[in-house]
Amino acid sequence: MGTIKAHEFTTLDGVIGAPTWTFDYGFTDEMGDSIGRLTSGSEAIIFGRTTWEESGPAWSSRDMADDPGAPFFNETPKYVVSGTRTDAEGWSNSHLLGAYDVETIRTFKNGIDGGIYTYGSGTLVRALLADGLLDELHLYVFPVALGEGPRMFPEGAPRTALTLAQSESFGNGVVHLAYTPAGF
């Protein structure tokens, strides 16, 4: 059975949408190493539709010389959760899982022997967490509050209990908080 690990770049006030605000803080080697530990051992990547559509053009044009993560993102099998797409053409090794369905995701997860990685894909990550399918949530918290934007835990969302499993800080002021669902 696979283990699903998600990472999100977030602000102090929980905003996760289109993280252009991260540019002000730089992406340090320490952060790269931290995310590298998340992706190591991953046999698959699962995406929500929007993140997959936005990531494909960015990653498919990169190679190892551009970014050490490029081989992982381009060569690892990718699975898209979408009820509106009819195919997953356009980015190598991509497959369509169809609309979000708990049993489909559970079957997918049970069919993977290693890790399953995801990033962004806020709607998908919230659903995975709510349905008990997310094993680890990694928040990279940037020292800025935006006051508006899509949030990891939007107003009106159900209570979600988590257990802190790890934390680390980086020289650019970003803090990495790793959580597991409470009771794990």
Image (tube, rainbow, N blue to C red):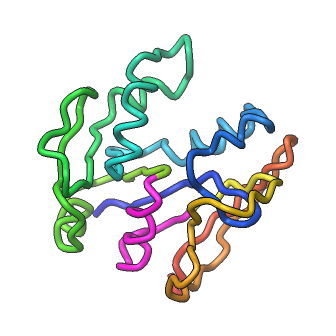
* Residue 120 is covered by the magenta coloring: no
In the image, is 98 to the left or to the right of 78? left
- Whether residue 40 is situated above or below residue 179 in the rendered picture: above
- Whether residue 176 is situated above or below residue 100 in the rendered picture: above
In the image, is 10 to the left or to the right of 25? left
Q: Residue at x 56, y 14 (%)?
A: 66
Q: Quadrant of the N terminus?
A: bottom left
Q: How far across and how far down the image is residue 112, in percent? A: 25, 54
Q: Nearer the viewer, residue 48 or 40?
A: 48
Judged from this view, the residue extending furthest toward the front is 148
- Whether residue 39 is situated above or below residue 10 in the rendered picture: above
Q: Residue at x 65, y 39 (%)?
A: 20
Q: Which of 11 and 138 is in front in this view?
A: 11
- The magenta segment: 121-137
Q: How far across and how far down the image is residue 40, in percent? A: 48, 42
Residue 179 falls in image quadrant? bottom right
Q: Nearer the viewer, residue 133 or 125?
A: 125
In the image, is 32 to the left or to the right of 121? right
Q: How far across and how far down the image is residue 137, in percent? A: 55, 64
Q: Residue at x 19, y 31 (%)?
A: 89
* Residue 128 is covered by the magenta coloring: yes
Q: How far across and how far down the image is residue 24, in percent? A: 79, 36
Judged from this view, the residue extending furthest toward the left is 86
Q: Which residue is drawn at 28% across and 54% down?
A: 113
Residue 95 falls in image quadrant? top left
